[in-house]
Structure formats: structure tokens, C-alpha cells
Amino acid sequence: MRTPDELREAIEAYLAGCELAPELGGLEDAIRYALDPAGKRIRPILCLAVAESAGGSVEEALPAAAAVELVHTFSLVHDDLPALDDDDERRGRPSTHVAYGEGVALLAGDALLAEALRLALGYDDPRLARELADATLGMIAGQFRDVTGADEDLVALHALKTGRLFDAAVGLGVWAARVPDAEQAPWRAFGADLGLLFQAVDDLLDGDGLVERLGVEAARGLADEAAARARERLGAVPADTSVLLELVDGLAVRTS
Amino acid sequence: MRTPDELREAIEAYLAGCELAPELGGLEDAIRYALDPAGKRIRPILCLAVAESAGGSVEEALPAAAAVELVHTFSLVHDDLPALDDDDERRGRPSTHVAYGEGVALLAGDALLAEALRLALGYDDPRLARELADATLGMIAGQFRDVTGADEDLVALHALKTGRLFDAAVGLGVWAARVPDAEQAPWRAFGADLGLLFQAVDDLLDGDGLVERLGVEAARGLADEAAARARERLGAVPADTSVLLELVDGLAVRTS
């Protein structure tokens, strides 16, 4: 079993070496800038760790893991635009639209989404790409609810905006490892709790979202419960889940 | 064989009735607005006509045809944004971002692309979705070259920006009709000429693009040659191509 750091190296190398559509020409610069290695790569590492735990090979799961990361990156590039969250900085440097202009950033985001689907479509099994397309729609729906400020259950909003892509990271991992449909439920339950844990800790670090809505203590409580449930779910999976446990522990105490 | 008008009715009915991801909620309004029936529907009609000419059923090809139209609509919504072409009007009414705001239009475009891939992924054969994803990347690459003003062969630019989706309309039509790979070449050659015809006539109507670069006469010449070649290609296809011939004739003399 590879450690999270080894999986991170594997996905960085894969992303650095993966060929984009050659027609993209100069647009590739902006896409590569957005994909810059300063990202945490939590979703692709999760995808690879699930695939390996479930008896699959990391190599076979790499395109799936990269596809999930490309969808995540597409969402960051578009969400940072002035028309949405208007963030000039991302990961300590200028956002893609600040570096390349809004028009190019818009097209770079579009291309990232199309490339993500192309990667997922490289598998013979169309269920990987289907799951990724569905998750993308859920994520977009979450961002729509967020920016239009519909006053609703924030946990439900997070389940769309963040959770759906975490679910897909786990889902593409088990599909890549050829886990039969009927045996996927415990893996997927784990993914849902991990997504909630990630978002609750994110809000605790930023002091917004769940913290604003429920207060620090309640948000901390949600995170702890999600972490406990995620560990419990892993106990129910008949596989070596030590690396996934390490991921849960890392997410529970992360400080950035 | 159904006439172009009958095919148009079929695609309108399919689009009006097709269910979007339920999570999209209020974003569906903006998506439906962008998909409004004032569109010419040339690409999906082409897809359906090719499928039926090639011995397939219109019903089976409808999701493929709709997927192509959704990709086209996604590109219009994003291209109209101020960061790109900054068009306030589309088909005689306010563009999506004027009607719904830039942020919502951005997300509506993203959702249209994801929904398009989801429709194409409804087929057992993943080659339909692969072809659509590839064509989308080519189209985005064409728009990038267009907005960044790289001074290059305008015919090559049109082949990306407009041509790739025309190619995909034909390609998804033959896949939906289960035409074997080895027998697709004449259909695809026809699609390439039809795309060029469409774009040349577009530039003649708008007085830009090829007209600006080459003058009216040369652009008219290109259109006439493309129409002649398209008719010739259809003569080489061992099928009833009368409806496709009608499409060529309609595109050659269209005035809007």
C-alpha cells in the first residue's frame, strides 16, 4: 500500500505528464497554471487510496483520479471569476483570471471540464464518466444555491457543492478497482462522511459557512462526528484501509 | 424519411421534455431560457437526418442530437459573456447573462456542457460521448484562437470553432445508427464540407470573418465550392440522402 505522500507524487507526475488536446495551443498555459502543484490533491489521493485499498492498481486509477482533480480545478477557476466569488488570489498567487484575463480563464475552465470527461471516458466502463458528469452537475447546483443565497440547510448545500465530488472520488476509485455495484455501499458511505469532515474543517479554518451558521462548537462537533463515522465505516470494509484511516486523521487535524 | 421540418419538431419536443438533473433547481430557468426554441437547430437536425439516412431510427438518435445542441448552446452562453464576445442580444432577445446575471449564465453554461455529456453517456457505446468531448475541446480551442486574435488561417480557425461540432453532429448520427467505423468516412467528409458551407454563409450574412479577410466574392466562392462538394459526397453514400441534400440546399441559400 502506498502512503498518501507517495500517492500525491503519483498524481503530480501523472498530471504533469498527461497530454491535453493538442488543438488547445496557447490555452494550455492557463490550464497548467490553474493545475499548479500547490493544490492539496485531496480528491485524487482519496480516489487512488480507495482504488488500492479495494484491490485495484494505482496505475489503472490514475486517469480517474486526474479527472476528478480537473473537475475540481475547473470549478475553482470559474468560481474565482468576478461574476461569482471574485477571488483575486488562489493558493497564495493570482487567480487564473488575474494572471490570464477573464476570457481566457473562462475558456480554460471549460476546457478543464471537457478534458476531465475525456479522461474518464478513456475507461471501457462508461459508469466512471457517468458518475463524474452527475457529480459535476451536483457541484454546479451547489454553487448556484450558494451564490444566489437561497437560505437553506447549509449541510445540504455542502453535500452538493463539496460532497458530490468527494463521492465521485470514492466512486471512480471503486469503479477503477472493478468493485461490483453490490459491494460499493460501505465505500460510498465512507466517502459521504469524509466529504462532510473536509467541509466542516474548511469552515472551521476559514471561520465561515457552518461556523457562521452554527457557531464554532457545533461545527467542531459536526467535524468530530463525521470523522468518527468515517473511521467506523472503514472498519466495516473488508480490506486494508490503513491508508484511508491516515487520510481521515490528516483531514481531521489539518491546519490549512 | 422525415423532412427537416419534421426533424425540427422532433428535436424541439425532445428538448422541451428532457429532464435535467433535479438538483439544478432554479438554475434550470436560465438553462431553458438559453435553449429557447428560437434557435435554428441546424446541428441536431443534421444529426437526426444522418442517423435516419444511415438506416438508424430518429428516436434512438434524439439524445445524441440534443447533446450536440446543448454543447452549442453552452458555447453561445459563455461566448456572449462580457469577458468574451460581450453580446447583449442573442436571437433577438437579451442574452442569458443580461436576463439572469453573469454568474448564473456562467453556471448555466457549465451545466449545459455537463448535461450534454450526460446525454451522450446514456448510450452503451462510449464512442458517442468521446467524440462529443473531443469536439468540445476543438471548439473551445477555436474560440480561444478567435478571442486572442492569433493571426492565422481563418478557414483553419472555423474548422475548429464551428467545424468540429458539425463533424460531431454527423459523427454522433452515424454512431447512433450503428454505422461501422470503416463505413463512416464518406459521411464524415460530407460533415466537414457542410460545416464550412455553414460558416462561409454565416460570414456572408454578417459581413465579417471570411468576407473581411477574403472579400465577398472569394467567400461566396468558398461557400459554393463547399456546397458542391457536400452534394458530391452525398452522391457517394450508398443510402437515401434526399433529406440531407435538402439541408445542403437550405444552408446554401439561407438568409438568416
Image: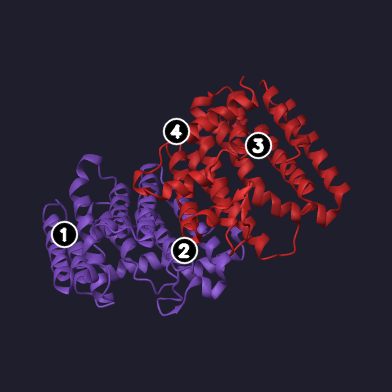
Chain colours: A purple, B red
Mark 4 vs mark 2: in front: 4
Q: What residue type is labelled 4?
A: Gly
Task: Residue B156: tell me if it is visible.
Answer: yes
Give the farthest residue toward the right: B217
Which secondary structure, mark 3?
helix
Can you say which quadrant of the picture contains the C terminus of chain B?
A: top right
At 11% from the left and 58% from the top, the residue drawn is: A232
Give the distance between the C-alpha atoms of the residues marked 3 and 2, in whole angstroms.
34 Å
Crowdedness of circle 4 by 10 Å Cα count: few (<14), some, many (20+)?
Answer: few
Image side of residue A226 versus residue B173, left or right: left
Q: Residue beneath label 2, please?
A: A78
Disc 2 chain ID = A
Task: Residue B54: tell me if it is visible.
Answer: no
Is B45 above or below relative to A29? Answer: above
Crowdedness of circle 1 by 10 Å Cα count: few (<14), some, many (20+)?
Answer: many
Q: Residue beneath label 4, please?
A: B17
Mark 1 vs mark 4: in front: 4
Is A197 above or below relative to B93? Answer: below
Residue B188 image label: 3
Image side of residue B180 versus residue B162, left or right: left
